[in-house]
Amino acid sequence: MERRKFLGLGLGVAAVSLAPVSLLAKEYRKELPKVWAVKNSGKVNDEAGINEAIKAVFGSDKTEDGKIKLKAPDIAENGAVVPVSFKLEKATKVALFQTSNPECLVAIYDIPEAGIPDYGVRIKMAKTGTVVVVAEVDGKLYKASKVVKVTAGGCGG
């Protein structure tokens, strides 16, 4: 009987510890439905769709360069798993975009007040395209971008 009490208590503590995390997540598909409708043109360097998506997320598409350290491969041998990481000292919101898939927006991150945005993700890219990170810092928008060449079959060409 002691074992059952111990397991029950352990599961109860685990459930309570996970509850606050689920309450913090925002459903951006419901909050910003227009941004998910923005589509890319399909051209490698055409960022018109991204600019429209930036405006839908942040309310403006006026960005400055700097503050964001974006790391992505020059050549991705497997478009299904492209590693992308970005880091900056502080931000309130960060969004990740790309031009190679039909939808522009990849992800939106809300950064807590004391949080340091230092994220690494793996994204899927159907073909060669541009990866763009936009961060809101003290009411200003900063942008970093990089072209990632996706090769077919890892042949490098």
Image: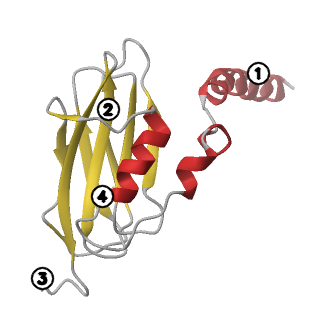
Residue ID at (41%, 68%) = 101
Q: Nearer the viewer, mark 1 or mark 2?
A: 2
**Which badge, 2 or 3, is on the more N-terminal residue?**
2
Tell me the quadrant of the picture where the C terminus can be found.
Answer: bottom left
Local SS, label 3: loop
* Alpha carbon separation for disc pair 3 and 4: 25 Å
Q: Earlier in the sequence, mark 2 or mark 4?
A: 4
Three-letter amino acid code at disc 2? Ala
Dividing the picture into quadrants, the one containing residue 69 is: top left
Three-letter amino acid code at the position of disc 1: Leu
Dot label at residue 156 = 3
Q: Could you say which is closer to the camera, residue 45 or residue 80?
A: 45
The answer to which of marks 3 and 1 sits earlier in the sequence is 1
| Residue 82 percent location from the top left of the image | 29, 63
- Picture disc at residue 9: 1
As measured in the structure, the alpha-carbon distance from the residue carrying label 2 to the one carrying label 4 is 17 Å
- Circle 3 packing at 10 Å, graded few (<14), some (14-19), many (20+), is few
Specify the amino acid type for callout 3: Gly
Q: Are marks 1 and 2 in contact (CB under 8 Å)?
A: no
Residue 135's label in the rendered image is: 2
Dot 2: element: strand
Coloration mode: secondary structure
Which one is earlier in the sequence, the residue at label 3 or at label 4? 4
* Of labels 3 and 4, the one closer to you: 4
Q: x, y percentage for residue 83? A: 27, 57
- Which disc number belongs to residue 47? 4
